Structures are given as structure tokens and as C-alpha cells.
Image (tube, rainbow, N blue to C red):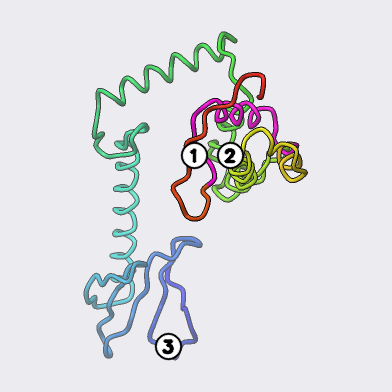
Amino acid sequence: MISTAKPSASSMLSVCDGRLAIGFILRRGRSDVEGFTAQNRSLGLFPSENAAAAALEARAQATARQRERFAMSTCRMCGSSPCVNPSFCAACRRAERQLTAKRKAGLLRESAETLRARRLLAPDISLERAWCELNNQRGRAAASTVEALAYQLRAGPSALREPSAQHRLAQLDERQMREFCGRLTKERWGLSKNGELPPRVPPWKPDEI
């Protein structure tokens, strides 16, 4: 179907399939017209507007069939067409089927974070929504707070007496607390003084944690 894009004085006509614009036609002189796809690619000159519109419709149908064939041949695991690693993707599909069967049978116990991640990966969840939910987690301290506390505690257990350290420590949730305690059990760099190389700080003792 051809619909005029501007008043009749204009030399451009748009070609639509329903509400989808598939191209446009430009008049070239008194007799010839030139057809362009929606991507602004010329299909050449035609003797009439109907001929140009038919060519644009045929090109749109061919493009739609090509996209459909590509979608059917695309590997669901790696996203390539053809698959770049058939054996690995086949193993992933088998593992996915096994996990799905265990999940339906109630034999697989998943953490709340795993269930939350699967929910955010659903097709109806937009990237913006997932990003906002991952970066605005209620009850969890910001990463900058954790790192500031780690830097502050390089001075040793005595740094826990400072109000700022106690305030930062109170913002950690249970998982962050376990991860942070694991960091204290490892050797790390201490605080540097007068621009010198910071000394190595031994890990905290169990009774200090």
C-alpha cells in the first residue's frame, strides 16, 4: 500500500505494510521513479510507482524470510550461526535439561540469589530494570563502604573502636560480613607512612574476628 508522506506537491511517497514503513519512492523526472528500502538502499529506477512498491514489498518479504531462517539456525547457547563449538553447546544443553528435570522434581535447592538472577534473566525483564535492581540492593552496603572499611581496618583490631568503623560495619549484611571476615583471615598490605612501602599485615586471629 502506498501512502503519501507529504502533500501532493512533494516528490516522495512512503510505502507501508500496515503500520510498518518498508521504504519510499522518489520521482525522477516525469516518467521514472526510484525505490529505496527503509535502510535507504536504492532498488533502481521503475516505470511506475506501483512497480516500485511491488519491488519494495518483495524485498521486505525476502528480508523477513532471511531473518526467520537465521533465527532458526542460531545456536541458543553461544548465539552464533552456525554454532562455533557444537560439542560444548551440546554438553550445555544436556546439563540444562538435567537441571530443569531436577528443578521440576524438587530435587534441586537453589539459593535466593540464584532464583533472583534467573528471574532477572527472563525475556520480559529489561536491561534497565535488571541493572537498577542489581545496583540498588536494599539491606546491602555499597561496595565503596566495604572497601573503606577494609582500608580502615588495615590498622588492626584497634581500628574497630572508631565510630566510623562501627558505622560502616553495621551496614554490612550477613553475606557481606562472612566475605569480609574471610578477607581478614588473609595477609594484606598495611597503611603506608611518609610515602614508604606499606608493610605486610598478618591475618587476624580467630578470637579477634
Residue at the image position 28 percent from the left and 65 percent from the top: 55
Q: Decide which of 50, 11 is in the foreground and name it.
A: 11
Determine whether, in the image, residue 39 is placed left or right of residue 98.
Answer: left
Q: Position of residue 110 (x, y in %)?
A: 58, 19
Q: Amino acid at mark 1?
A: Trp
Residue that mark 1 sits on:
189
Q: Is residue 188 magenta?
A: yes
Please state which amino acid type lies under the numbered disc 2.
Arg
Q: Earlier in the sequence, mark 2 or mark 1?
A: 2
Pinpoint residue 99: horizontal percent, then vertical percent: 48, 16
Q: Position of residue 168 (x, y in %)?
A: 71, 42
Say which label, 1 or 3, has the lower sequence index: 3
Q: Is residue 61 magenta?
A: no
**Tag 2 secondary structure:** helix
Q: Decide: marks 2, 1 in contact (CB < 8 A)?
A: yes
Part of the protein shown in magenta: 170-191
Q: Which mark is residue 10?
A: 3
Q: Which mark is residue 154?
A: 2
In-front residue for pair 187/117: 187
At x 34%, y 61%, the residue is: 57
